[in-house]
Amino acid sequence: MTPDVTIPTAVDKATVAQVLRDISLLLQLQGESGFRVRAYDMAADRVAGLPQELGPLVAEGRLESLPGIGPALAEKISELVTTGRLGYLEELRAQFPPGLLELTQLPDVGPKKVARLWRELQVSGIEELERACREGRVRQLSGFGAKSEAKMLEGIAVYRRARGERKLLGEVLPVATALLERVKSAPGVVRASLGGSVRRQAETVADVDIIASAPEAGPVLDALANAPGVAAVLGKGDSKCSVRLEAGDLQVDLRVLPDEDFATALHHFTGSKAHHIRLRNLGHERGLKISEWGVHRDDGTKVRVTEESDLYALLDMQYVPPELREDTGEFEAAREGRLPEDLLTLEDVQGAVHAHSTWSDGRNSLEEMARAAQALGLKYLTVTEHSEAAIYAGGLKVDDLKRQWEEIDRVNADVPGVRLLKGIEVDILESGALDYADSVLEQLEVVIGSIHVRHGMDEDQMTRRLLAALDNPCLQILGHPTGRLINSREPYPVRMDEVLARAAERGVAVEVNGKPARLDIKAEYVRQAVKRGVRLVVSCDAHQKEDLRNLAFAVATARRGWARKGDVLNTLPADRFVTALRERR
DNA sequence: GCCGTTTTCGGCCCGACTGTTTTCAGTCG
């Protein structure tokens, strides 16, 4: 036993952030108002946005170096991370029934209302609120009426259907884009754009924001309210309109303003909240008041801001692309001119990595995949079927592989302009060995190694397994390195810092998988990988030809991790891509 | 609860919309 050594716990930063948010809500239930509450919320955002876990910061006593975290919060976070518990949270929780926090998840129900429902009607959970509404007891409270009851019942129904989950960007973006096109074609619209977390390309989103400029807002708001697929109009005023779509209970908010305010409004409603607050404060230091209604000097005169880039120029900093607006270092970099100017774009990508066909568990033939890639303007596509061990996915035996090469040669001869590269997504076995012999792997142009089974190993075992795979000289690309499925499967436990360090050392590329439910590795790890000089590939993990468009989500994730064109191997032409993969260290 | 080229106290982003009011509180972003 070594009691004087700080023992790291399994408390990750997402858990810490959630605890801080719970404390914020509990303080509001207590009637604590305003700034103390916000300090906890800001700290939660700060912790959640950290590029690494909290363990080292706690051990080195550096928590207070984070903006928004002072002595009181640092002490609470330390207690939570080192002991796995937080006495202050337990004291607060003991004062309220456990169901109250969940009540605040309902739309238009916040801590003030929850506190009154509890004190005056003894409502302590969703079931009891539903009963109180049905029995007409809520309307008897002052400030509540029949409409409030109906809205709460509707809110409860929506909440139960959605289970409080955020939606995948990949599911929402097509719907959002279609609505944006409808808004753009409404009468008088000058400019229109998506905003919010959809524009920042966050991996999951809660709703869709659209910002438009037009001389008259009314007809534009009507265009959304009357759009096909709208289940309910949640609210509609002079400048904004909120609707809920039938598909996925998705909420869409539209704001319409005069064109002279478009840039500042777009910036405001793109967020993130943390980025925007920081920007306003920087403006304040220069005597500029920044709001969605423009930029004003202290004497009340308005500064002309036509594009978002004007706003950053006013503050003597580089333009910050939406994907980087999280207040995780972009301000410091932009003020010092250190933001990457050559952030990866979809146009930079020459070939799609990671595709399956009917040879294993894909739905389209090799020729169909090749023609779809050609139609998207791609120059090559890596054909990487599953290997023998992946029986569930129709993994290929070595003989199958050789027959497949003949078909690849034929398709390459028939389909001009695009080249299928001969590859494999070989299983990384429990020991870290690869599922094919080196003599087979050496004949392939692209070797991705991925874990598909035995996700239940512990952190030590899983880390050793991945490090062993990286040491294999035949491995060129580490596929979906953490194995997560957003909203349905946690990543397996693994020490990513060690894995990324080894990948950098060995020259193995790491996949940024663009399948919307994977996005693996995630943006925070991309940023660490870039810092360490790890080479990346952006992939589509395609199982049908439509999935080639997943590349856009891999690019989004790479951008959110500050990856530049030069960090990503499949920005190279096919020959140089294959050569680069072989250059192991 | 945090923060400091208005620095150890007194600020802290702020407007739109709804439902319930009859001038405003609560919620949201």
Image (cartoon, coloured by chain):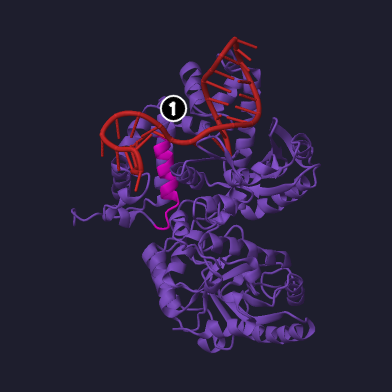
Q: What residue type is labelled 1?
A: Leu
Give residue A113's position: percent from left, percent from top.
52, 24
Taking depth in this image into account, of A102 and A525 the one nearest to the observer is A525
Label 1 resides on the chain identified as A
Q: Is mark 1 on a helix, strand or loop?
A: helix
Q: Is residue A272 left or right of residue A246?
A: left
Q: Mark 1 points at which residue?
A: A29
Magenta-drawn stretch contains A245: no
> Which tint is chain B?
red
Name the image quarter holding residue A56. bottom left
* Left or right of A121 on screen, residue A263: right
Residue sitting at x 56%, y 68%: A342
User: Could you tell whether A578 is left or right of B4 in the image?
Assistant: right
Provide the letter of the chain coloured purple.
A
State the residue at coordinates (48%, 77%).
A508
Image quadrant containing the N terminus of chain A = bottom left
Taking A551 as reference, is A78 above or below it?
above
Give the quadrant of the C terminus of chain A.
bottom left
- Residue at image position (40%, 25%) is A30
Question: With respect to residue A74, does A530 lie above or below?
Answer: below
Q: Position of residue A482 (x, y in %)?
A: 49, 63
- Is residue A42 one of those drawn in magenta? yes
Regarding residue A337, the answer to whether it shows in the image is yes
Per the rendered image, the range of residues in magenta is A37-52
Image location of residue A532, percent across then percent down: 42, 70
Which one is nearer the viewer's eye here, A448 or A43? A43
Q: How crowded is mark 1: few (under 14 residues within 10 Å), some or many (20 or more)?
A: many
